[in-house]
């Protein structure tokens, strides 16, 4: 998730030394203080957090049911068998099938799914509780393209949406009805929506920052909309030109109008872990905004790490606070991959009960507020990981990669997806 109004620009942010930035966004910095824990108990039982946000805990205290990997130790006989099988991998021309049935295919592609019964038993201890199905919300056509400097032709955007839908993605965020003055890349929102509003087999929500945008979206044929709030006061003022409370007033008007027309509204919360201006964001602030959006009628709340500073250590307390006021089944997560933490953040979110994930084909996007931000987590990488976990998405990875190739060829750049690069015809054969 990124800019809805005039981008703040990294050059306008307060200067921070590298050490200061690490301190501001460290895992300890975002853990709830004593006054924040009212939104819910600490997810990792036994943790005692001081008012300085530092945590005092012994290794032995990680024994909570929600942190199973500290409790389960591999059986010695299983471990020895596993090691013996794994050692065979060093032999030349040995197929992976002796350890995991990853099927060395004629085209040298691998399945990440393990079929060994012993290993699967061990894995189940680590991954118990994962959802059987995860809904992927593709945000590439909107969040992925809106920061592109060169205008992408309307026809290319339309074709990208159609290709993404054909890959099996159930939700594809199509565009945003914002002022062209602030987001010129999406000035063709009306034309894009009119061209794809008849697409079947997928929902095509659009972003509507106010009542005027909502009305324009509905007139263009939109059947689903989304609103965008922030957990950071500074970010809200720089991004949508109003305070958090003022934005919530706007969105109540949108939700009221949408309810009268039976149009579903999705809510976004940005800066759920950190803000480029304020630093670490207390989980209680995120929970407050999420609860307000939920109470006004948003059917789903997407929690976005806008600048990609989150780690599992900061995502867990944030989710725990939000889940105290919004049901887990009504939540989605939206991670940017600035520090390469998106996949572990998604995994821990799934372990906590989230079953909806936002992502962007080829890792398109980014945030103008995070220097070096590498974009949204790539949909291809999410699909590959979930497939390896045995979690269904109903997404055809091959077709998804073709959609990624299509937009990358137009943009003239390499894919931001490690999976797409590894599985490309030009990749080195293993």
Image (cartoon, rainbow, N blue to C red):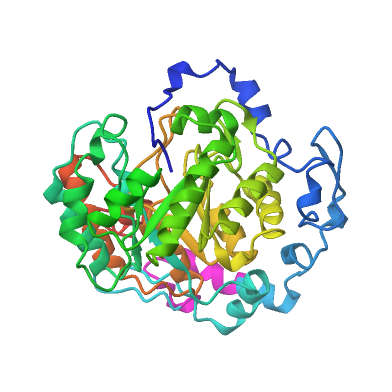
Query: Residue placed at 28% from the left, 62% from the top?
Result: 400
Residue 247 in sight here: yes
The residue that appears at 38% across and 56% down in the rendered structure is: 225
Residue 259 lies, in percent from the top left, at 44, 63
- The answer to whether any part of residue 157 appears in the image is no
Q: Is residue 344 left or right of residue 419?
A: right
Measured as percent of width and height from the top left, residue 190 is found at 20, 49
Q: Is residue 280 left or right of residue 298?
A: right
Going 45% across and 22% down the picture, which residue do you hit?
A: 10
User: The C terminus appears in which quarter of the rendering?
Assistant: bottom left
Q: In screen coordinates, is 269 left or right of 37?
A: left
Which residue: 55% across, 15% down?
15
Q: Nearer the viewer, residue 207 or 351?
A: 207
Quarter in which the N terminus is drawn: top left
Query: Measured along the vertical axis of the image, is residue 218 above or below residue 340?
Result: below
**In terms of secondary structure, what is the magenta stretch mainly?**
helix
Q: Quadrant of residue 108?
A: bottom left
Residue 54: where, in percent of width, then height? 81, 37
The residue furthest bottom is 117
In the image shown, does 381 or 346 lie closer to the viewer?
346
State whether residue 149 is above or below residue 341: above
Q: Quadrant of residue 349?
A: bottom right
Closer-to-camera residue (187/252):
252
Pick the front one: 40 or 135: 40
Verify whether residue 374 appears in magenta: no
Query: In the rendered structure, does residue 88 fall within the stretch colored magenta?
Result: yes
Residue range corresponding to the magenta coloring: 83-100
**Across the whole image, how many numbered discs are drawn on residues?**
0
């Amino acid at each position: 998730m990124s800019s809805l109004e005039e981008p703040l620009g990294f050059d306008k942010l307060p200067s921070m030394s590298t050490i200061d930035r690490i301190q501001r966004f460290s895992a300890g910095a975002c853990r709830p203080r004593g006054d924040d824990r009212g939104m819910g108990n600490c997810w990792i039982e036994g943790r005692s957090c001081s008012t300085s946000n530092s945590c005092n805990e012994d290794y032995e205290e990680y024994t909570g049911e929600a942190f199973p990997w500290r409790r389960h130790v591999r059986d010695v006989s299983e471990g020895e068998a596993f090691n013996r099988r794994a050692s065979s991998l060093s032999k030349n021309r040995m197929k992976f099938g002796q350890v995991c049935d990853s099927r060395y295919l004629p085209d040298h592609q691998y399945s990440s799914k393990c079929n060994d019964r012993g290993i699967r038993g061990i894995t189940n201890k680590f991954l118990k509780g994962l959802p059987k199905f995860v809904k992927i919300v593709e945000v590439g056509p909107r969040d992925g393209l809106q920061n592109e400097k060169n205008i992408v032709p309307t026809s290319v955007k339309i074709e990208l949406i159609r290709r993404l839908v054909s890959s099996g993605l159930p939700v594809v965020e199509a565009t945003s009805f914002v002022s062209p003055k602030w987001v010129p890349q999406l000035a063709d929102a009306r034309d894009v929506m009119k061209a794809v509003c008849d697409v079947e087999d997928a929902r095509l929500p659009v972003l509507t920052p106010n009542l005027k945008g909502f009305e324009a979206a509905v007139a263009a044929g939109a059947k689903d909309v989304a609103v965008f709030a922030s957990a950071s006061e500074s970010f809200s003022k720089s991004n949508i030109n109003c305070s958090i409370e003022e934005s919530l007033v706007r969105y109540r008007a949108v939700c009221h109008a949408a309810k009268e027309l039976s149009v579903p509204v999705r809510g976004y919360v940005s800066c759920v872990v950190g803000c480029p201006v304020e630093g670490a964001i207390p989980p209680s602030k995120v929970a407050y905004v999420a609860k307000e959006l939920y109470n006004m009628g948003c059917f789903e709340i997407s929690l976005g790490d806008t600048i990609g500073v989150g780690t599992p250590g900061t995502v867990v307390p944030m989710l725990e606070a939000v889940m105290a006021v919004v049901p887990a089944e009504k939540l989605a997560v939206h991670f940017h991959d600035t520090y390469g933490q998106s996949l572990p953040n998604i995994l821990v979110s799934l372990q906590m009960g989230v079953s909806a994930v936002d992502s962007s084909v080829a890792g398109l996007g980014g945030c103008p507020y995070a220097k070096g931000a590498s974009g949204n987590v790539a949909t291809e990488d999410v699909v590959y990981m979930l497939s390896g976990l045995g979690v269904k998405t109903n997404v055809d990875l091959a077709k998804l990669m073709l959609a990624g190739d299509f937009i990358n060829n137009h943009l003239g750049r390499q894919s931001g997806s490690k999976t797409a690069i590894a599985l490309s015809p030009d990749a080195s054969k293993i």
